[in-house]
Amino acid sequence: MGQDERFGENIITGDETWCFAYDPATKRPSAERVGQNSPKPKKPRFQKSQVKTTLIFFFFDAEGVIHREFVPEEQKVNAEFYVGVLDRLLKRIQRVRTAKFQSSEWFLLHDNVPSHNAAVVKKFLANRNVAVLHHTPYSPDLAPADSFLFPKLKFPLKGRHFQTVEEIRCAVTRERNNISKTTFLEGMKKLKERANKCIDQGGMYFEE
């Protein structure tokens, strides 16, 4: 699939992620030198805040974010809920990527978690003629949300304290707005490179 010259341009991909009221900046232990007889320095204990924002869904392509959705608190993210997310995504694509929506050349790429891979989800996508790219199990290299978008959104938030869910959501939105269209294009080009590498290695998982 990665041999197509327009491979990255034809994909809409997405996933969900948690953000925290406090996420430690680093987990690396102190690098201070100690003498031979000095006690071993204690590894600092970092703990993510137990106060989490609701899940955030992001769907994007080479031009940028298409749909962002904050999941209501206490909402169980199951296959039925995901169908609703996809329905709202398709309506958003129709509004902001009209030419792509009307063509038959774009593909949806999401991973294989149960809520994405359920029969009701597959039926919904088939009924709406949405072509889905096969995602190799246990291959985060081929998940642009994990390898590209989420690190860019969440790394600047590490070490910062937020008092409310709304503060977290606003911070995530600001970071999203700071990512340029060029950066999204480069991120999707890297997906093509990763896909070709995966094909060359017979579908095996790899890490950079």
Image (cartoon, rainbow, N blue to C red):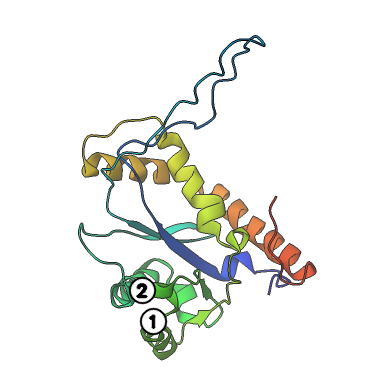
What is the x, y in percent for residue 116? Answer: 42, 74
Residue drawn where x is 47% and y is 38% of the image: 155
What is the x, y in percent for residue 88? Answer: 31, 71
- Identity of the residue furthest to the front in this view: 37
Query: In which quadrant of the rendered view does residue 136 lie?
Result: bottom right
165 with respect to 79 (left or right): left
Q: Is residue 151 visible?
A: yes
Query: In which quadrant of the rendered view does residue 69 lie?
Result: bottom left
The reply to whether discs 1 and 2 touch (Cβ–Cβ < 8 Å) is yes
Residue drawn where x is 41% and y is 46% of the image: 176
On-image quarter of the N terminus: bottom right
18 with respect to 136 (left or right): left
Q: Residues within 10 Å of mark 1 (few under 14, many from 20)?
A: many
Q: Amino acid at mark 1?
A: Val
Q: Which residue is mark 1?
A: 121
Q: Is residue 179 visible?
A: no
Q: Nearer the viewer, mark 1 or mark 2?
A: 1
In the image, 149 versus 31, the foreground residue is 31
Q: Which residue is mark 2?
A: 86
Please determine whether, in this image, residue 197 is positioned above or below residue 34: below
Q: Secondary structure at mark 2?
A: helix
What is the x, y in percent for residue 200? Answer: 79, 68
Query: In which quadrant of the rendered view does residue 134 lie?
Result: bottom right
Q: Secondary structure at mark 1?
A: helix
In the image, 105 versus 198, the foreground residue is 198
Q: Amino acid at mark 2?
A: Leu
Please determine whether, in this image, residue 111 is positioned above or below residue 36: below
Q: Which mark is residue 39?
A: none
What is the x, y in percent for residue 70? Answer: 28, 57
Residue drawn where x is 27% and y is 34% of the image: 162
> What whole-number distance in Å separates the C-alpha atoms at marks 1 and 2?
9 Å
Q: Residues within 10 Å of mark 2 (few under 14, many from 20)?
A: some
